């Protein structure tokens, strides 16, 4: 999840993208009128699920498309980019109804315009906020009526995306996918800082989006019952071809070690969006953008078994609590929460920064982990008698290559994923955890702070998760500062870890603001980074709360 901290010069955004009838995943959306936002793809009046009305000027990106054969229209799930006023309990993107004859929105094609889309998204992140109007009583809300009969295909010349005034050079706040603004990340010091790519995922967790006119005759099955089609069964086809390879053979044949996690993995995949990409078998090359893969039983088993095998084997390596079932359960729940936000357990989720796979690992993170942690993890696996470690030992694990061109090493089934990516996710967590433990232990000694073992583990686990976004340096500096204050010390002495984490948001925001100002970043880039870094841990918790509400239980052992 790390990348080198660089600030490219500002790019002109005089972009022309073709608008067309059929919306597709990855397309950009700009609303031209009032549109109703819904929690799910049910658009009938009796469903009473309108939760917001979005206003003209709201910008978003398409995450999922549902076609209604009876009307020829579409339901589209979109990720809001510049909307405000959306409640925190709506932790997944919202749905709008796309009326082909009267769409009330512009669509800009994503296919073949990767660089233009990325540049446009960068600018849209800093565009004026447009408030979403909450519908407090859905039973009394009326459908938004539009009278324009705009054609579904924009006449030539196609509508350009507006070019905002030239701004000072600034970093792109983040690509699509959560998943997510640049992330300061350095295992030990600023000079090795990296950035974790996730503007999309954070937007999806922090705010939701999408509205639309009323559909009178639509009924949609829940996403988990969606049938695989020729368009979205590409991972199923690859599983068929690769099932004889050691890692995939183990994952397919093993019975789930923790069956209660199956629903958590499946539901996370259902509620999470892209973008996604596909690796060609036999070439280790990206073949381009891909739709969201169908959530088949085999794919869920592969992902669940890969996740649980690595976490069950390496949880003790991560936190030093080998054999403690309570700590193991909470460690796995923390990892579920992190992956739920970062990728939604989609092995081929990838942002345009190169952050890829379950833990959104980049080439910078891969390089750091290869140097510092890969051999340690392999030694732990070889020496452990844990059944999950024995399972990993049979998989002929190989390190990923630390280059931007080797993305398939981190997402491709042929390269041993999802196991490979989870190993690197745990490796990055270990890099952060080492620095966090050193800082916390030193400040506890210096200031006479009293924490029980359980309280300390809760604190270290939360800071490790937070550091997946900020990097070790970006979290240990604020923690060190807060543990010198009366408020921070009193919160910890009272055993109130949640209060301490709440206070830490302000310290994280201040530190990252100072860090970027000292490097000449623009005010917009600084503000964006402060929001992302300070809010990341809460974003993780919010989306985990949503997942567990949908599943009906905690995602623990």
Image: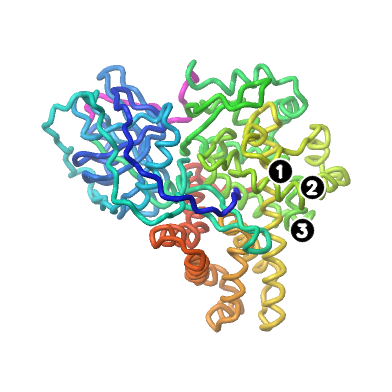
Task: Determine whether, in the image, residue 148 is placed left or right of residue 407.
Answer: left
Q: Mark 1–mark 3 contact, CB under 8 Å?
A: no
Identify the residue shown where x is 58% and y is 78%: 494
- The mark nearer the N terminus, 1 or 3, is 3
Which tag is nearer the camera, tag 1 or tag 3?
Answer: 1
Q: Mark 2–mark 1 contact, CB under 8 Å?
A: yes
- Residue furthest left as drawn: 147
Q: Which residue is mark 2?
A: 377
- The mark nearer the N terminus, 3 or 2, is 3
Viewer-side residue, 250 vs 522: 522
How far apart are the alpha carbons under marks 3 and 2? 15 Å
Crowding near the residue tagged with mark 2, few <14, some 14–19, many ≥20 C-alpha atoms within 10 Å: many
43 is higher (above) or lower (below) than 491: above
Q: Which residue is mark 3?
A: 321
Q: Which residue is mark 1?
A: 423
Which element is circle 3 on? loop
The span picked out in magenta is: 214-229
Q: In x, y percent, where is residue 553? A: 54, 47
Task: Indicate whether residue 228 is drawn in magenta.
Answer: yes
Q: In x, y percent, where is residue 497? A: 57, 69
Q: In x, y percent, where is residue 81? A: 36, 46
Identify the residue shown where x is 71% and y is 73%: 441
207 is higher (above) or lower (below) than 153: below
How far apart are the alpha carbons under marks 2 and 1? 8 Å
Identify the residue shown where x is 22% and y is 48%: 137
Which element is circle 2 on? helix
């Amino acid at each position: 999840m790390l990348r080198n901290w660089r600030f490219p010069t500002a790019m002109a955004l005089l972009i022309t993208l073709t608008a067309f009838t059929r919306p597709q995943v990855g397309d950009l959306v700009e609303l031209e009128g009032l549109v109703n936002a819904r929690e799910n793809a049910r658009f009938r009046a009796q469903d009473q699920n309108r939760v917001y009305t979005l206003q003209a000027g709201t910008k978003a990106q398409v995450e999922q498309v549902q076609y209604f054969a009876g009307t020829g229209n579409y339901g589209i799930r979109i990720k809001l980019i510049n909307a405000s006023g959306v409640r925190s309990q709506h932790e997944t993107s919202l749905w709008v109804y796309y009326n082909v004859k009267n769409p009330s929105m512009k669509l800009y094609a994503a296919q073949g315009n990767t660089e233009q889309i990325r540049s446009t998204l960068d600018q849209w992140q800093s565009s004026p906020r447009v408030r979403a109007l909450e519908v407090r009583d859905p039973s009394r809300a009326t459908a938004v009526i539009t009278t324009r009969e705009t054609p579904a295909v924009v006449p030539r010349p196609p509508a350009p995306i507006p070019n905002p005034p030239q701004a000072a050079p600034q970093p792109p706040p983040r690509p699509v996918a959560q998943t997510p603004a640049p992330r300061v990340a350095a295992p030990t010091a600023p000079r090795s800082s990296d950035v974790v790519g996730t503007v999309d995922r954070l937007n999806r967790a922090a705010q939701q989006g999408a509205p639309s006119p009323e559909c009178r005759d639509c009924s949609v099955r829940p996403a988990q019952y969606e049938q695989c089609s020729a368009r979205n069964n590409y991972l199923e086809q690859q599983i068929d071809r690769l099932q004889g390879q050691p890692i995939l053979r183990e994952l397919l044949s093993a019975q789930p070690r923790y069956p209660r996690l199956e629903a958590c993995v499946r539901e996370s995949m259902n509620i999470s969006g892209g973008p996604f990409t596909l690796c060609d078998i036999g070439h280790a090359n990206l073949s381009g953008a891909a739709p969201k893969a169908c959530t088949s039983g085999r794919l869920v088993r592969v992902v669940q078994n890969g996740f649980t095998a690595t976490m069950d084997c390496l949880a003790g390596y991560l936190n030093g609590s080998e054999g403690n079932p309570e700590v193991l359960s909470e460690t796995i729940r923390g990892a579920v929460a992190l992956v739920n936000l970062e990728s939604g357990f989609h092995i081929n989720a990838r942002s345009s920064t190169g952050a890829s796979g379950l833990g959104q690992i980049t080439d910078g993170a891969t390089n750091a982990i290869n140097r510092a942690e890969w051999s340690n993890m392999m030694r732990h696996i070889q020496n452990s008698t844990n059944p999950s470690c024995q399972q990993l030992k049979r998989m002929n694990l190989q390190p990923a290559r630390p280059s931007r061109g080797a993305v398939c090493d981190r997402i491709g089934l042929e390269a041993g994923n999802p196991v490979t990516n989870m190993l690197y996710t745990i490796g990055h967590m270990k890099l952060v955890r080492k620095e966090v433990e050193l800082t916390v232990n030193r400040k506890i000694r210096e200031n006479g702070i009293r924490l029980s073992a359980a309280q300390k583990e809760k604190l270290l686990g939360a800071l490790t998760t937070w550091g997946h976004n900020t990097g070790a340096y970006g979290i240990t500096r604020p923690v060190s500062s807060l543990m010198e204050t009366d408020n921070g010390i009193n919160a910890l002495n009272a055993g109130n870890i949640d209060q301490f984490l709440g206070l830490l948001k302000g310290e994280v925001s201040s530190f990252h603001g100072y860090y970027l100002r000292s490097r000449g970043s623009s005010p917009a880039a600084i503000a964006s980074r402060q929001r992302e870094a300070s809010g990341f841990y809460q974003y993780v918790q919010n989306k985990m709360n949503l997942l567990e509400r949908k599943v009906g239980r905690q995602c623990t052992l």
